[in-house]
Amino acid sequence: MAGGTFVTQNKVRPGAYFNFVSDSTLGTLGSRGIATFALKLSWGAAKEVLTINAGDDVRTLLGYNISDSQLLLVREALKRAGTLLLYRLNAGIKAAATVGNLTATAKYGGVRGNDLKVIVQMNIDDNSKFDVRTLLQTDEMDKQTVSTAADLVSNDWIDWSGSGSLTATAGSSLTGASDGTASNSDHTDYLTAVEVHDFQVIALPSNDATLKSVYVSFVNRLRDTEGHKIQLIVENYPTANYEGVISVKNGVVLSDGMVLDSVSATAWVAGATAAAQVNQSLTHQAYDDAIDVNPRYTNSQIEAALTNGEFLFTQNRGRALVEQDINTLTAFTATKGKLFCKNRILRVLDAINNDLREIFDDFYDGKIDNNADGRNLLKNEFVNYLNMLQSIGAIQNFDSQTDITAIQGDEADIVYIEVAVQPVDAVEKLYTKVKVR
């Protein structure tokens, strides 16, 4: 039976889930934990959005185990994210081998196909048949006993073609594969493909300045034009000056000695940001399995980076800590003040946008009358949601009598609602006066 704690009532497995904090019902708070990015890979379906959940066995899907270096960024993202929407940018060239009348072609393009091998041996129980084995390096991935080449059925690794009798071979390696290239237009295809999916955070694991600009424009459109409140993680791009963009300044050193730069660190930041709940901050949270930062900065450099809207890691007693959970917004205005640069605050505001929009779409749009009774129903739904946010410490001082109004809009089908909310931030600074007597 499954168990554990919960933030929202969104568990999939039957089980008993307990929180020893309060008896509040969490209602319609949307789930978090979905990150996405695109990579150049050596195996897997190209030009598709692949859904990978934490704990999944990804070898068939991506060609490697999650612990292999080829999937470093996938592993780093899934240290925190519950789900990764991964897109393979490159198609690559498929490996192949021909044994007599039989041709074996790798399922996907990419150099992983060169690690495949086909063994054809006479079946020991029936000398009219052959055992055809598919090996990935030394691991057997598939075995079929057939009479002719045409009897073979494609498996997860190889597509078969040919007809007629089979020829025995102790081992024929597939060859000729390559990863190919990935262009900026492939990234554009990715953004088009992923736009129709639900996610909270998108990362760009690249230092290409042109791509950074393309991704920022994409996120700006989704946030400000279409109301899809997501955030972008990029490396060293504080000039974005936008609450929807987090700029990662440095990387970390993992416990096995592997050094990750700021580009690679975007994967973990994406996963951690997606998984952070509306009542959580990443400030001073430790990067999983990291023992140092790369590079280290002085106190004055750290202060300058924070002022510049940069997300960075600092070393602390054998750990790599998030110095402050901020985004790149630094040019504050009367309508968008300093609070908007804090990602915990932004998560609350984005949740209010996304969740109330979903509530309206699912239960009210076109389904209730735009009269006093209908508007009160909608207002009460908003109140219940905001009270729930207050119960988990995401907002404070909300008064349903004074902080929300719902009135007839300028046209017969419009409801105009005004809401005042005060998001709760995390304690980040302590000033203490100690009197010595």
Image: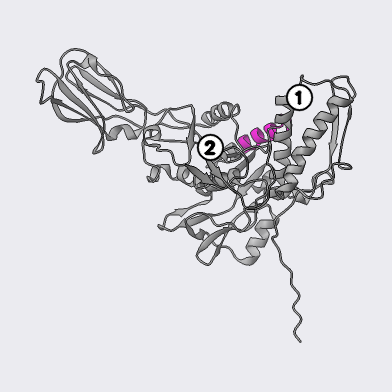
- Please state the horizontal and vertical placement of residue 8, each as a whole percent of the image: 63, 41
The secondary structure type at the circle numbered 2 is strand
- Residue 276 point in image, percent of width and height: 61, 47
Left or right: residue 87 compared with residue 169: right
Foreground mark, 2 or 1, reads 1
- Of the pair 404 and 411, the residue shown nearer to us: 404
Which SS does the magenta portion mostly show?
helix
Q: Amino acid at mark 1?
A: Tyr
Q: Is residue 241 visible?
A: no
Q: Residue furthest bottom?
A: 437
User: Residue 407 at x, y = what percent?
Assistant: 89, 29
Quadrant for the C terminus, please: bottom right
Mark 1 element type: helix
For the question of whether residue 356 can be seen, the reply is yes
- Of mark 2 and mark 1, the one earlier in the sequence is 2
Q: Residue at x 52, y 67 (%)?
A: 317
Q: Quadrant of residue 46?
A: top left
| Residue contact between numbered discs 2 and 1, judged by CB atoms under 8 Å | no
Query: Does 133 appear above or below 307?
Result: above
213 in relation to 435, above or below: above
Provide the residue span drawn in magenta. Answer: 213-227
Which residue in the structure is indicated by mark 1? 364
116 horizontally vs 370: left or right = left
Mark 2 is on which residue type?
Phe
**Which residue is rendered at x = 66% and y = 48% of the image?**
238
Question: Extreme top residue here?
Answer: 164
Disc sitting over residue 37 in the figure: 2
Residue at 75 percent across and 84 percent down: it is 436
Disc 1 residue crowd, few under 14, some 14–19, many 20+, Cα 10 Å: some
